[in-house]
Image (cartoon, coloured by chain):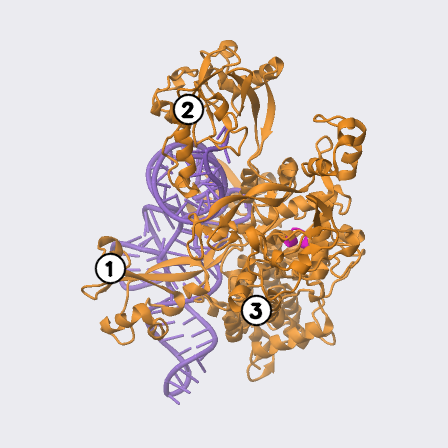
Amino acid sequence: MEYKFGEIEAKWQQQWKADKAYKVEMDETKPKCYVLDMFPYPSGAGLHVGHPLGYIASDIYSRYKRLKGFNVLHPMGFDSFGLPAEQYALETGQHPADTTDKNIETFKAQLDKIGFCYDWDREVRTSDPGYYKWTQWIFLQLFKSYFCNTQQKARPISDLIKKYEEKGCAHFTAEEWNAFSEKEKADCLMKRRLAFVSYGEVNWCEALGTVLANDEVVNGVSERGGHPVEKKKMRQWYLRITAYADRLLEGLETVQFSESMKEMQRNWIGRSEGAEMEFAVGEGEAIKVYTTRPDTIFGVDFLVLAPEHELVQKITSAEQKQAIEDYLHYVKSRSDRERMAEVKQITGCFTGAFALNPFDGKKIPVWIAEYVLAGYGTGAIMAVPCGDQRDYSFAKHFDIPITNIIGEHYNGEEANATKDAILQNSGFLNGMLMKDAIGVAMDKIEELGIGKRKVNYRMRDAGFSRQRYWGEPFPVIWKEGIAVPMDEKDLPLELPIEKEYGPGPEGEGPLANIRNWVELEANGRRETSTMPGYAGSSWYFLRYMDPKNTGAFCDKAKSDYWNQVDLYIGGTEHAVGHLLYSRMWTKFLYDKGLVSFDEPFKKLVNQGMITGKSYFFSVNADTKEIGTYDKLEEGKEFLRYKYGHQFVDGTGRLKKEVFDKNKSGVEHIISWSKDEAGQFLMLKEESEKMSKSKFNVDNPDDIVSKYGADTFRMYEMFLGPVEMSKPWDTKGIEGVHRFLRKLWRLFFDDIKGPLWNTDKPTPAELKSLHKTIKKVDGDTETFSYNTAVSAFMVCVNELSEMKCHKLEILQPLLVLLSPYAPHIAEELWHATSSPSSVLIAEYPVANEEYLKEANKEYPVSINGKMRTTITLATDVSPADAEAAVLANETVQKWLEGKAPKRVIFVKGKMVNVVI
RNA sequence: ACCCGGGUGGUGGAAUUGGUAGACACGAAGGACUUAAAAUCCUUUUCGCAGUAAUGCGAGUGACGGUUCAACUCCGUUCCCGGGUACCA
């Protein structure tokens, strides 16, 4: 009997489906394990070989945990709202709902062929009304909540209203509040809601008459058509994620994310501690600056305002009026693109005004410059040229005298941002170490009442509306300028199915075109924008726990049981988007008492990208010579060509089909080639992200039909650590396939049939098995799947060599293997053990007795050089000291009585003797 | 510029976290079986030198130094590659 993987895999996939073998329910008697993949966006291109990498890894872990006795939740779903579907729909005239459904079917069929153990009964789709009903519901809860700064948590907005009615607040009294109009009250509350409306800048493209997403804008022009894009203020929805900034930072300490991932999130949040303080200027005006280095206060030689700063007009002197006008005009004329490209260029303008240093009353000139951003801090800075390079360059450029407060640490040629200098020229801070002076200066500032400590964040509130069609509609109705939430009983507010979904008038979303949907009786008008892609993905991991619930987003008892995601696998590209948003939503739901954990993901593993290979070469236009890619640099007459790996064979030769497929560039190449099959080329090879347009995509279906799903799964794991990015290369796949066939031949002979027997195993065989159990068990737990695969190979090689066909050895091996190669393991298990139809077994445990065999012999090195081995009589469990004594005696005997100077016994591994 | 990763054979990658560097696989070379092919099996494969040979000697984990009986692993300096952020005060 040969290994017919095609038949075997189809058979078992069908069986699993029919048996609902991977259906999972809550079970209080078992420990739970929640293993999750970042759900895919179902694009029209289908899966490529890069996608399944993370899915295979999580599938292995799920199957492994299941065998270990855990109740494993391992679901899959689709992030099915989003821009590409809408664009595709606009192009082809199909409805996004239809194309999305079609794409999902393709995805599911492809996934099933790889043999994943998903419980498809728990599938979720973010574009399904039964799902987005709850996205809308959570949005309403956010809308109806505010962030209480004293309790550091979300509370109902009704609490805030009550407080306003009874006590008022810093800005108004209770009487004033009660006298406010409805509109005034609503505007006031809007400033505290966790989901709120504000005016924000969007990318507006006049030519296309639409608002563009950030990634649709490339270098300041629209990605399609290259039309100019400008900033336009529009009414937008936001989530007040900044309120959760500190908790998002603290939470990172409690989760197992990679250091780089945590660092990215910390940088994104960008917390900095400093002080805000005021510099008096003119009559009764004051400039408020933000600084993290109040210790340098005596080194302030000028202040700089952002050009947009509100005080600019007020404080500008008559003489400087014209210069400032000119400068403001210049700033306005500069596009974002120019500003970004010319960061190094120093520009600015003196306002003619002087501010007073609050400590020594020194007169400080006030400038404006575009290097100061209006959006961060107070939009104004105090400039300390000896300590900050940008301030230094500015001072040099405009000839502003520089005060040195750090003595020899400042060399007069560049700024020095040290905190380790002793302060000079610094009034009451003189002689103090800068590090220590920071706190002292802050205390003084607060004591004198000229400022206060302030924490700043780089992170902005998250824009939550999109002027798009294919997303969740907002359950909000506008009545006389007031946003009125819909009644929760009327959810979901379904997305109207329409044929036209071009942009609406005046930058509104496509929904604005659907008049009978938008315009309501009782002079209400629906919100016409839709929610962004991350709305649905911010909470989907909760829905899997209770996907069909129509009365709640997730039953509390269920979320209590399944709790946090134990293992979350996905790409790094979501480091600051999806992961921050879903962490915030979880914290919010936790505040509301709707879930009992406030971090969604306990452990995160980032799978690397599988890249495709592209090959570069160049052709000389004059000599028709095909040369190396590098020649491009030597002479411009070389034209550059690039092909995906599909067009290049193993030797770097262009395949014949290139000439058929890509006529444009290649037609003449073939006429220049000396060799009909394709000239031999020296190519430069490069790895790039897989994409259809680069012809470097491999489809998993092809691999599966050629080698089988088990080979595919094991091969992707064998390529290297899951976290690592690596180029896709089918070269090594034969090796893995050979391994599986070899395993098969331990059970079946092609001609003679079954080979297995029930003989008692030898110690050597047991040792081989238990060594493998130990290795594979450890590696699977720690996601070192590549070395686990190697361990399997070693074991099967050893067993083949020993001609071991004993079930007592082989069956535990099958159990061990089943997470990696479930089909073949299932088939062989079924063949050798009746009558159970599916593999249900306990995960084998390594027996240390058998493993001790391995530790009996110790290599010995003498003076770090010569080597031999000694055998320690008994099974020393090497607490190093006692083993060293034992080794010492043994070595003495072996050296015929001569005592070694020193014997070092290392972890049961090796003996090093110094004579 | 700054912050994270990472540099190991022809290639992908191992190395129990300080203990015989190069597991496992690919590729390559040679051989067995076969009319032949496929499949399978065996041998060699870090580099250099010596030898008919078994083998021996020397070098070797980007580079240079240090700690240690012992360093891919720890420390310092430096170079290169990948990722993230960027006038954030």
**Residue type at the position of mark 2:** Lys
Horizontal and vertical percent position of residue A97: 62, 66
Residue A535 locus on image (x, y percent):
64, 51
Return the disc, 1 or 3, that comes first in the chain's sequence: 3
Span shown in magenta: A536-540
**Which one is nearer the viewer's eye here, A567 or A263?**
A263
Q: Residue at x 54, y 66 (%)?
A: A44
Q: Give the secondary structure at mark 3.
A: loop
A641 sits to left or right of A203: left
**In which quadrant of the rendered image does the N terminus of chain A lie?**
bottom right
Circle 1: element type: strand
Relative to A520, does residue A354 appear above or below in the rendering? above
Q: Residue at x 59, y 38 (%)?
A: A881
Q: Give amino acid for label 1.
A: Phe
**Label 2 vs label 1: CA separation?**
56 Å
Q: Which amino acid is tagged 3?
A: Gln
Letter of the purple chain: B
| Mark 2 surroundings: few (<14), some (14-19) or many (≥20) residues within 10 A | some
The total of numbered circles placed on residues is 3
Q: Which chain is orange?
A: A
Residue A413 on the magenta segment: no
Give the SS element for disc 2: helix
Dot in front, 2 or 1: 2
Q: Which mark is residue A94?
A: 3
Disc number placed over residue A638 in the picture, else none: 1
